[in-house]
Amino acid sequence: MTEHMGGPESPEKIAERQARYEVAKTAKSRMFKIVDEATGEAVGSVGYWEKDWRGERIYETGWGVLPAFQGRGIAGTATALVIERARAEETHRFLHAFPSVANAPSNAICRKLGFTLIEECEFEYPPGNFMQCNDWRLDLR
């Protein structure tokens, strides 16, 4: 699941990120658990948060689905719901996604949901790990 984002993280890093997600309940940052309706099982997460990018304050979005549940359209459906939530807040005009250039499924989600490919760029995620990403932008207005 983290193949395109710097590889596996230690249990400590996962717990640290989870703690940040749990306090991210303001209009500036939202994280959601993706739940399989049939089983009630958590299968991933999706969210958006504020970021300074190219001199502008934007929302960034990201998602992850456990490998056993990938390929079913879950990430796309969850991301579409997050887009509507960010749009309804009317806080920022643009929502960006930065999938690795090698992550074909995530790039396909961006295309399918109406994002515009702006450029390929170097992106740091997680901190200390640089990768080549596509900068996809969606106008929320």
Image (cartoon, grey):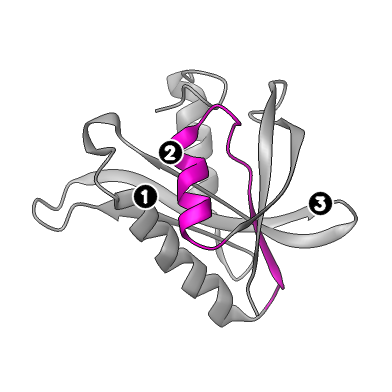
Nearer mark to the viewer, of 3 and 2? 2
Q: Is residue 64 left or right of residue 21?
A: left
Amino acid identity at mark 3: Trp
Q: Quadrant of the N terminus?
A: top left
Query: Does residue 113 appear left or right of residue 134 in this picture?
Result: left
The reply to whether the magenta stretch includes residue 104 is yes
Label placed on residue 32: none
Q: Amino acid at mark 1?
A: Ala
Residue 116 x %, y %: 65, 57
Q: In whole angstroms, how far apart are the C-alphas of marks 3 and 2?
A: 24 Å
Magenta-tinted stretch: 91-114
Left or right of residue 99, residue 104 in this image: left
How far is disc 1 from disc 3 in space, using C-alphas? 24 Å
Query: Which sits in the foreground, 39 or 21?
Result: 39
In the picture shown, does residue 59 fall above or below 136? below
Q: What is the number of callouts on the image? A: 3
Sequence order check, earlier mark of 1 and 2: 1
Question: Which quadrant holds the C terminus?
Answer: bottom right
Report if residue 96 is visible in the image.
yes
CB within 8 Å, label 1 to label 2: yes
Q: Is residue 22 visible?
A: no
Q: Nearer the viewer, residue 78 or 45?
A: 78
Residue 126 drawn at (x, y percent): 63, 28
Label 2 belongs to which residue? Answer: 105
Q: Which residue is mark 3?
A: 53
Label 3 CA crowd tier, 10 Å (few <14, some 14–19, many 20+): few
